Amino acid sequence: MSGKLENASRRGFIKGSLMMIPAVSVGSGVSLTVSADVPPPNLSDYQPIFFDADEWRFIIAACDRLIPSDGAGPGALEGNVPIFIDRQMEDKFGHATDWYMKGPFHEDASPLFGYQSPLAPRDVYRKGIAATRRYCQQTHGKDFSELDEKTRDRVLTQLESGEIAFDDVSASQFFDFLLQNTKEGYFADPIHGGNKHMTAWKFIGFPGARASYREWVDQHDKAYPLGPVSLTGERG
Amino acid sequence: MAKTNPHIDVVLIGLGWTNSIMGMELTEEGLDVLALERGPDRDTVPDFAYPKMADELTYGVRYQLMQRPAKSTLTVRHNVGDTALPYRSLGSFLPGNGVGGAGAHWNGHTWRPQPQELRLKSYVEENFGSDIIPEGMTIQDFGVSYDELEPYFDFFEKVAGIAGKAGNLNGELQAGGNPFEGWRSDEYPLPPMARTLNDTMFHDMAAEQGLHPFPLPAANASQAYTNPYGMQLAPCNYCGFCERYGCLNYSKASPQTCVLGALKRRENFTYRTNCEVMKVNLASDGKTATGVTYIDEHGEEVIQPADLVIMGAYALHNVHLLLLSGIGQPYDPVSGKGVVGKNYAYQMSGGAVLHFRDKEFNPFIGAGANGEVVNDFGVEQIDFGREGFIGGSYLNAAMTNGQPIRNMPLPAGSPNWGADWKQAVQENYGHAMTIGSHGSNMAYRDCYLDLDPNYTDDHGRPLMRMTFDWKDNDVRMTQFMKQKIETLSQALRPDDYRLSFKDFDSHYDVRPYQTTHNVGGAIMGTDPSSSVLNRYLQSWDVHNVFVMGASAFPQNLQYNPTGLVGGLTYWAAKAIREQYLPNPGPLVQA
């Protein structure tokens, strides 16, 4: 994108004053403080903070099918989406910190009444991954992460449709969290761990945190020409 | 043992739009005023400052500025007799929390009601006969007229710096405005916002079809503005982070940008945050309030004596507090007796997504309320007898919140994940617009609020219970709007369009966001046997308790509620200042 169109004073402000931005982190002891000058980790070097090694292989193998690398645009793995999900498990979302989690629970209620499980999302993941891995061993004789792409897609489709049922967790609820969090990590600001170098934003043409378009609002039916900026001032 | 604070003249419960206004009005009388806000303190700086606000995940998806169900929620059921279930995570509606309340994170659509909507029952009876009101529908008049409220609508619009175009100035129609609106004594304080591509396409097609498009009245400043309190708004920069976000640019009207800066300078005003009122305390005869009991930021119980109590919490919380305080008789849907909790109503909406492969909408460029509207199918336009329903909608196109986690409309049949999803995302992001229908919702005998018998909050108080479902009358209304929107959609010749409207099999679903326009439960009216409040928003039962907000609406408007909420607050404030303070007691004899 053309550098001439970029606003020098705004860029200076972003770079100068916002090198360190603490993101939301609750009670986990995990610092999400990110510096613009510290490059995001490589997925292969990352040590998960919530998932164990087997779970981590599952998350990577599942994300790889939910948003694959083939075709145009980044896949979930190029975007570090598994890192985003791992961090979310230790954040308020994973712990259901903001949700009303008092009983009694009526898990058989109509879905119209929303989430009615006593499990926090991180527990849904833990049980869902374990149950899916057991299912794959029983049905296919292999770990989920060792299945070919087509078979992984079939298992994920079965989870989504509720065709597979587990005893201790809703398969479709597990899938819903997994898909929701995968898309969140793909499109959220890189400060949350995914969307590495804003590749998903560049792919679709979303300018991220620019948040100033007064001179563009009247320019109809023209593609916006500037690349994205992130909360830490990274430019794409 | 609860601690007791020194006496204060006025205690305000909540510090959003209504009680910010009440604070201004009552400090002008020289009264000592204390506001108790349940949530944290919030101001543009540091809480809404750039760049942290431009974070879709934190604010748009994880609801950082909203009420947390863990702290406060309610239960929901469809029918009397069902067991209600807790609204455990946010979805359908998003009550605010903290200073500014929902007024900090709204979009800014600022409407006056139609004159007919304020006296809906009388209007229906006079024009169509009482026979057309279906069994079980419990609509009422507000007990105050449009003409009485007009000066207060006008002042609220000036405080909030509303951008728009008048359609009716003192009875004379004005080109470019809404020709169907009630009369206005003055033009909007600011000119309309800029039009985005989708607004222009909708405007031009509506005009071509013989409809009457006009700019959506916006609480997003189209130009620099100074309001009557000396508060300054900056021109909106169409940042795209509006609803669910605090304004990073001092452009969206909110208690922070329009009132609180002026109010905080007054020596006879104080406010305390993280202080949650448990109940309003009553004198032994039950006819006056002696103050409130609250839990302070250290978790200690405090009694706050006061002469006057103004409830200005979110509509649902006002009703909850009335029920917990024993003010007014709780409503019973079986006998139809009692009033507190009666006539809870919501908003009937629907819409279309239109895909245009070759058009660039740049959906991230927009404000909360830049848009174009037609009012041709409003409550006041429709022949209820002929169409078979009571109600109406405005139809609009607007561009807001085009961030990709939540705003990724794909054509029908697109996959949810996988390589084909990724391709669909690339092909469709930025190439879609919507046309929405924002409609009224009538009140019904079995749609109401009471205390839940099974679930409690952290203080051991019963949660409030909502009994609510969609009714045929309102589904007929939205199906009528569906036809109108389908006609407009087809005329725009998109590559693909998708309609989403309630039908006769639809039941209320708490999961998808619909609107934070929960109304009723503490309704105003002309008779204590059918309303909680008189026409001045004063409790019929406890004369020194006034209840602001949309909890006073006897049924819901076709419009967003804030314009009426603001107008009613100034109307009530004038009555308190000129009638109540000189002679405290009931302002209307029962």
Image (cartoon, rainbow, N blue to C red):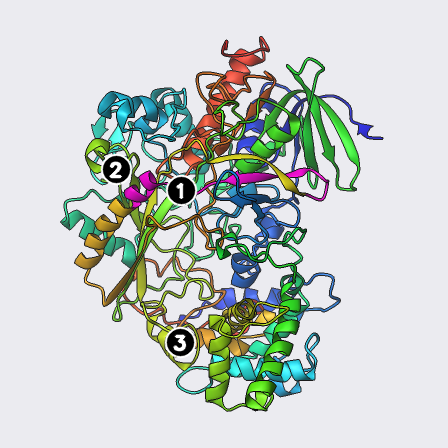
Seen from the viewer's position, the closer of residues B447 and B289 is B447
The earlier-in-sequence mark between 2 and 1 is 2
The earlier-in-sequence mark between 3 and 2 is 2
**Residue type marked 3:** Trp
Q: Furthest residue to the right?
A: B1
Q: Residue at x 75, y 38 (%)?
A: B296
Other residues around mark 2 within 10 Å, as few (<14) / some (14–19) / many (≥20): many
**Residue type marked 2:** Asn
Seen from the viewer's position, the closer of residues B235 and B303 is B303
Other residues around mark 1 within 10 Å, as few (<14) / some (14–19) / many (≥20): many
Report if the CB atoms under discs 2 and 1 are less than 8 Å apart: no
> What is the chain identity of the residue bearing mark 1?
B
Locate residue B125: give its quadrant: top left
- Which residue corresponds to mark 3? B421
- Which residue corresponds to mark 1? B347
**Residue type marked 1:** Gln
